[in-house]
């Protein structure tokens, strides 16, 4: 039920084959594709496959630690996951893309109603990124309280992001 393909220097080509399999799979619950060279194209391909299967997919955990994703890839990933609605735990650790990636994630957090756990460790998001995430979490919480959503982040890992008191206060 879990597939760990981390650390094999896999590229976008491998991601296309993996996406084809993911579109048909209903038993896999966790995919760890960390420490590969997937880049934006590979991550986009995988997330598109997940969004096409949507809630029918059994995949609830996606680990994309150190895969070379940029802000563009983060935006597409979060958009696809919002449409697919199956991922509850997402790890984007150690992609080092800074506050712009945090802003891209923050833009889509309110729409990702299934997402409960998010790890953004070691992404250099700093205080600006934390403020964006905090504002998105506040919007998500307001939607839950107003009855317009049933979800929201319950676990958030921001360690290793050079957050100062200002970022902590924003949270």
Image: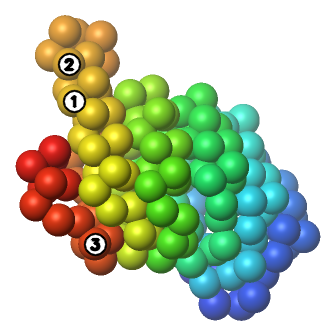
In the displayed image of the protein, which residue is found farthest to the bottom? Answer: 8
Q: Earlier in the sequence, mark 1 or mark 3?
A: 1
Q: Determine contact: label 1, label 3, CB under 8 Å.
A: no
Residue in the picture at 74% in, 52% down: 44
For the residues labelled 1 and 3, the Cα–Cα distance comes to 22 Å
Q: Which residue is mark 2?
A: 142
Decide if residue 37 is on the left or right side of residue 127: right
Q: Determine contact: label 2, label 1, CB under 8 Å.
A: yes
Q: Earlier in the sequence, mark 2 or mark 3?
A: 2
Q: Quadrant of residue 76?
A: top right
Numbered mark located on residue 75 in the image: none
Mark 1 Cα-neighbour bin, 10 Å: few <14, some 14–19, many ≥20 = some
Q: Quadrant of residue 3?
A: bottom right
SS type, badge 1 = helix
SS type, badge 2 = helix
The scheme the figure's colours follow is rainbow
Residue 1 picture location, percent across and down: 52, 67
For the residues labelled 2 and 3, the Cα–Cα distance comes to 28 Å
Mark 3 Cα-neighbour bin, 10 Å: few <14, some 14–19, many ≥20 = few
Decide if residue 133 is on the left or right side of residue 28: left
For the residues labelled 2 and 1, the Cα–Cα distance comes to 6 Å
Residue 49 picture location, percent across and down: 74, 46
Q: Which residue is mark 1?
A: 138
């Amino acid at each position: 039920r879990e597939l760990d393909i981390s650390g094999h220097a896999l590229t976008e080509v491998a991601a296309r084959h993996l996406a084809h399999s993911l579109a048909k799979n209903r038993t896999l619950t966790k995919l760890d594709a960390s420490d590969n060279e997937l880049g934006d194209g590979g991550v986009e391909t995988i997330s598109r496959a997940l969004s096409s299967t949507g809630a029918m997919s059994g995949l609830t955990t996606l680990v994309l630690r150190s895969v070379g994703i940029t802000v563009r890839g983060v935006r597409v990933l979060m958009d696809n996951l919002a449409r697919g609605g199956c991922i509850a735990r997402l790890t984007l650790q150690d992609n080092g893309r800074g506050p712009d990636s945090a802003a891209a994630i923050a833009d889509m957090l309110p729409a990702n109603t299934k997402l409960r756990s998010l790890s953004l460790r070691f992404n250099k998001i700093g205080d600006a990124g934390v403020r964006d995430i905090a504002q998105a979490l506040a919007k998500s919480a307001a939607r839950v309280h107003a009855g317009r959503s049933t979800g929201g982040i319950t676990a958030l890992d921001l360690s290793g992001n050079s957050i100062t008191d200002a970022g902590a206060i924003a949270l």
